[in-house]
Amino acid sequence: MTTMRIDILNPKATKLLKDLAALNLIAIQDTPQNSFAGVLKKFRSKFKSAPSMEEITAEVELVRSKRYAKSEK
């Protein structure tokens, strides 16, 4: 068995896929709406802009310095 994720660009393809499923040639499974990408999209929609690379780097360095300080004790 091979599993694929397919993005349908043309609604006519949906009918074709359903016809193939009716012939038991393929199985169609709905993907859950709370996928990781969906969660990210939801979080991102709440903010006006994404953090800059400098802000991300500063946060990473802060976490690393705290981690290394704990491991040296």
Image (spheres, rainbow, N blue to C red):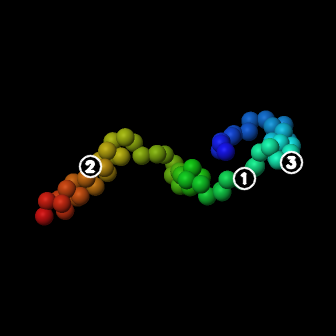
In the picture, which quadrant includes the C terminus?
Answer: bottom left
Type of amino acid at the residue the image marks with label 2 = Glu
Query: In the picture provided, is 68 more to the left or to the right than 10?
Result: left
Q: Which residue is mark 3?
A: 22
- Residues at marks 2 and 3, CA–CA distance in whole angstroms: 55 Å
In the foreground, 31 or 46: 31
In the foreground, 64 or 22: 22
State which tag comes first along the sequence, 2 or 1: 1
Determine the secondary structure under disc 2: helix
Q: Residue furthest left?
A: 73
Q: Residue at x 57, y 50 (%)?
A: 37
Query: In the picture provided, is 60 more to the left or to the right than 9?
Result: left
Q: Residue furthest front?
A: 1
The answer to whether one can see residue 57 in this image is yes
Query: In the picture provided, is 61 more to the left or to the right than 27?
Result: left
Residue 6 falls in which quadrant of the image? top right
The answer to whether one can see residue 45 in this image is no
Q: Which mark is residue 29?
A: 1
Q: Is residue 4 above or below residue 41?
A: above
Q: Which residue is mark 2?
A: 61
Q: Position of residue 14 (x, y in %)?
A: 81, 42
Q: Residue at x 14, y 59 (%)?
A: 72
